[in-house]
Image: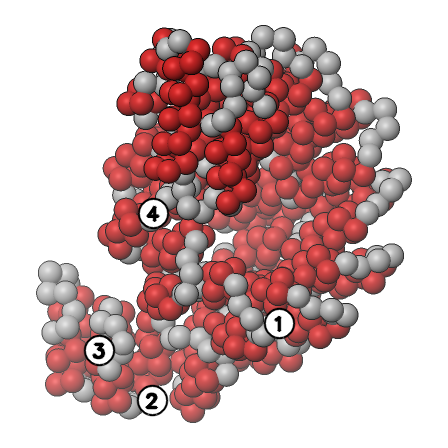
Amino acid sequence: MRARFGLADPKCGIERHTSGSFSRGRRCFLGFLTRWIYPPRWPNSYVRQLRTLSGLTLECPNLRSWGRLLQHCASAQDLHQGRLLHAQIWCSPELRRSVYLSNLLVRMYGMCGSLETAQEIFDGIQGRNQFSWNIMLGALAIGERLDRAADLFDRMPQRNEFSINTILTAYSRHGHVGRARKIFDEMEDPDVFASNAMLNAHIAAGDLRGAEVAFHAMRIKDVASWTTMVAAIAEAGQIHGSLAMFQRMPAHNLVTWNSVIGTFAASGLPGEAREFFARIPERNLGSWNALLTGYAQEGQARESGEVFDRMPQWNVASWNALIPHNEDAAASKMVFDEMPERTLVSWNCVLTAYGMAGHLALAQQVFEKIPERDVVTWNTTITANAVRGDFSRAKSLFDSVPKRELLSWNAMVVGYSLHGCLTEAKILLERMPYFEFVPYNALFQAYARAGHVEESQIMFNLLTGRGISAWTSLAATYGHVGQTKTAKIVFDAMPRHDVWAWNNLLAAYARNGHLFDARGIFEKMPEPGLVSWNTLIGAYALEGHAAEAISLFHEMQGFGIGANDVVFVATLTACSHLGLLDMARDYFFSMIRDHWITPIPEHYVCMVDILGRAGKLAEAQELADGMPFPPDPATWRSIVGSCQIHSEATLAARAAERLDPGTSDPYVLLRNININE
C-alpha cells in the first residue's frame, strides 16, 4: 500500500516539491485520505481532526493532533489507517524525529499485533526515553512474546513501577510462579496491583494453595483480590469454600456479583447461580449476561433460553452467549442467522461449533467468509483440523497464520499427541519459543496412553515449578496403565489435592475394576462433583453391579446434582443388566423431558438392548429403524444377540444382513443361533 502511493520512501515525491507546492501536495494528500480512505466508522471528531491537519504547515506541526489520531488507531486496532498516518509522518523529517510520535507508533503497531514493525520503530528511535522502553515492553507482553519481553526488561537502563508491573503481569498470565516471585520479592513496596498479579500467577499455574497463601499475605486487598479468590475457589470445585470467601468480603461490587453468578452457572450449579442473581442489589445487562453465559457454557440450553427470554434487553454479547458452546452446529447456525448484529466473536462462535462437531468442510467455509480474522479465528480453525487429525490442513494454516501465538503451537502439539504422533509432537514442542504446560502435558499424556511410563516420568522430573496439574497428570499416567498403587503414591506426595486430583485417582481405581477402593476414595472426597458421580456409577454398571449403580444414581439426584448424557448411559446400562424395562423407559423419557438432554447413539443402543433382553424384539428393531441417525453395528449385534436368547432365527437373519458382510460377525452370530436351535 505504501509503495502504491509513493509514501514509504523518505525521498518520496512529496518531499521533492518546493515548500509552497509541498503544502499544496500535503493538503491534497490529506484531503484524499479523508474523502476516499477514511472509514465511515470513525467519529466525526477525528474526521475534523484530519481536515485540521491538512491546513498545518510543515514548520509548525501540531504533535498532539497527530498523537490523538495514532492513539485512536491503537484503541480501534485499525492497522490500515495507522499505516497511512505512519506514511505521512515518515514524509516529514520533523515528525519523523519526534520521540513522542515514535512511541505512539510503537504502541499502535503493538496493539494491532504487528510486533516486528513495532520493534523496528523502537530500534530506530534516537534518544529513547522511559516511555519508549515501557511501551515496547507492553507490546511484547500483550503479544505473548514472553521471552523477548523478559530480555527487553533485563536490558532496560532504568525501570519504574509500570515496567515491573508489566513484566510481572506477563509472567502471572502464563503461570510462571518462580519468575513472577523473583520480580515480586525485589520490589521495595509492592502495591495491590502487583500483589494481585502474584495471586493470578498461582491460579494460572493451578496452585490454589499457593494463591491462598499469597492472598493471606497481602497487606492491602481490593475488591479485585477478593473476587479473584472467590472465582478460583469455585472453579476448583470447592463451592462451600467459595461461598464462605464471598461472605467474608468487606464489600461487594457489581463485578463481584456477576463473576460469582457466572462461575456458579458454569460449574453446573444453577440453583446457586439463580440464588445469587436474585440477591443482587442492582442488576445490569452484565448480570443477565453472566447468568446466560454460565448456563450456555455448561451446555444447559433450556436454562439459557429461559434467561434470554426474560432479559429486559439484549446486546450482541447476549446473542453470542446464546450460541451453543458444544457440538450442536445446527443450533449455533440457527442462532447466528437470527442475530440482528454480528461481531467477530459471533463468527468465531459458529466456527467453534462446526469445529467441535467435526464439520471441517463447513468450518472452512465459515473461515473463508469471515470479514476480518483475528488470532482466535486462526487458532480455532487450526485446532479443529489438528484435533480431528487433518494435519495437512492444520500445518498449512499453522504456517500461514499472520501472528503465531501460544495457542497455535498448543493446537498442533495437542493434535499430534491425541493421535499418537509422538515424534512430530516432540519435534514441535522443542521448537516452541518458550515452555507452556498445556502442550507439554498433552505429550506427557500421549506417552502414558502409549504405555511409555518411563518417558512420562522423565518429562515430569524435568518439569520445574510443578503445579497441582503436573502431579495430577503423573498420577493419571500410572492409572492409565493399571499401576494404581504407584498412582496412589504420587497422589499422596502431592502438595495439595483439588477436585481433579481426586477424580483422576478415582478413575484410576474404577477403570481397573477396583470398585471397593474406588468407593473408599469417593467417600473421602471433600465435595464430589458430577464427574465423580459419573465415574463411580459408570464403573459399577460396567462391572455388572447394576443395583449399586442405580442406587448411586438416585443418591446423586438426592444431593441436587444434575445428570448428564454420560451418567444416563451408565444408568440405562444398569437397567439393561437387571432387565428393568419400565424403569429404563422412565429414565429415557425423563432424560429428554426433565433434563433437556438429546439422546445420543449410546442411549438408543441401551434401549434396544433392554427391549431385546425383555423379548420385545419387534419393538427393538422398530426403535433401531426409527433412530434419528443410522444405527451402528453395536445396535444390530445387540438385536442379533437378543434373537439368540429368544431363538428368533428369522429376525436375527434380517438384523445380521445390516452388519458388514466383510467381517465374520454376522456369520458367527447366526451360526451360534443355529447351533442353539
Which residue is more in the foreground, 366 or 421?
A: 366
Of the residues under marks 2 and 1, which one precedes in the sequence?
Answer: 1
Residue 155 position (above or below residue 150): above
Kind of element beneath mark 1: helix
Question: Which quadrant would the N terminus be assigned to in this image?
Answer: top left
Residue 274 rendering spot, x and y as whole percentages? 66, 73
Whether pointer 2 and pointer 4 mark residues with C-beta atoms closer than 8 Å, the reply is no
Q: Which mark is residue 270?
A: 1
Residue farthest to the front, as pictured:
20
**What is the three-letter code of the residue carrying label 1?**
Pro
Q: Which residue is mark 2?
A: 614
Identify which residue is drawn at 60% across, 15% down.
Answer: 99
Residue 220 occupies which quadrant of the picture?
top right
Residue 422 rendering spot, x and y as whole percentages? 37, 34
Identify which residue is drawn at 70% across, 24% down.
Answer: 163
* Closer mark to the observer between disc 2 and disc 4: 4
Q: Which residue is mark 3?
A: 640
Q: Which mark is residue 371?
A: 4
Which residue is more in the foreground, 480 or 672?
A: 480
**Left of 529 or right of it: where is 351?**
left
Residue 102 position (above or below residue 319): above
Residue 425 position (above or below residue 666): above
**What is the three-letter code of the residue carrying label 4?**
Pro
* Closer mark to the observer between disc 2 and disc 1: 1
**What is the three-letter code of the residue carrying label 3?**
Val
